[in-house]
Image (cartoon, grey):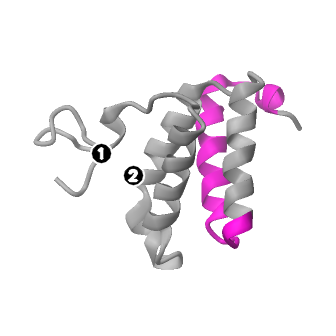
């Protein structure tokens, strides 16, 4: 199956989240390859940069649950973010890290 065969563009961010989550169980090289894969998909036009941003947002939102199985998940997601910034996939939106109104952010359990 290709990315184009997913059917709904809304599923692409879920694909990004799944790739990032799957990579967390791998070694450094495996996580690096997952980041390169995602960057490559953006460069080739199979994914939009916004798909990666939304997938990262979803990954960040579920880190507390992921940390049960992968204690170093925070470190791994930060490596992915650094890779995408370095690769210039896109200037990631600051809202990924800081919600516009932290008092009213319902999706963020840390506020």
Q: Residue furthest front?
A: 86
How far from the left and from the top, in percent, is residue 99?
24, 38
In the rendered image, which quarter contains the N terminus?
A: top right
Q: Earlier in the sequence, mark 2 or mark 1?
A: 2
* Residue at the outermost left position: 103
Q: What is the span of residues highlighted in magenta in the rendered image?
A: 3-29
Let me know if residue 17 is in the magenta part. Answer: yes
Distance of label 2 from label 1 (alpha carbons): 7 Å
From the viewer's perspective, is 80 left or right of 58?
right
Q: Position of residue 32 (x, y in %)?
A: 68, 57
Which residue lies under the disc numbered 2? 61
Residue designated by label 1 = 107
Identified at 60% across, 28% down, the residue is: 10
Corner quadrant of residue 33? bottom right
Give the dominant element type of the magenta stretch: helix, strand or loop. helix
Judged from this view, the residue extending furthest toward the right is 1
Instruction: Please tell me how crowded label 2 is: few (under 14), some (14-19), or many (20+) other residues with Cα within 10 Å.
Output: some
Label 1 SS: loop
Q: x, y (%) of residue 92?
A: 43, 33
Is 19 on the left-hand or right-hand side of 3?
A: left
Residue 81 higher or lower than 46, as above or below: below
Question: What residue is shown at x 79% (from left), y 32% (from top)?
Answer: 3
Asked which quadrant contains residue 91, the reply is top left
| Percent of width and height locating residue 49 | 58, 27
Near-viewer residue (5 or 76): 76
User: Would residue 93 appear left or right of 41 to someone viewing this image?
Assistant: left
- Kindly state the secondary structure of the residue where label 2 is placed: helix
Whether tag 2 and tag 1 are in contact, CB under 8 A, the answer is yes
Q: Residue at x 57, y 36 (%)?
A: 52
Q: Is residue 1 left or right of residue 6?
A: right
């Amino acid at each position: 199956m290709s990315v184009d065969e997913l059917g709904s563009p809304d599923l692409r961010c879920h694909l990004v989240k799944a790739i990032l989550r799957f990579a967390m169980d791998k070694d450094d090289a495996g996580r690096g390859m997952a980041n390169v894969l995602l960057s490559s998909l953006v460069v080739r036009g199979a994914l939009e940069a916004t798909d990666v941003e939304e997938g990262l947002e979803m990954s960040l939102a579920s880190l507390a649950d992921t940390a049960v199985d992968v204690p170093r998940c925070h470190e791994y997601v930060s490596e992915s973010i650094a890779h995408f910034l370095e690769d210039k996939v896109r200037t990631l939106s600051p809202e990924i890290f800081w919600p516009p109104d932290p008092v009213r952010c319902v999706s963020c359990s840390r506020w």
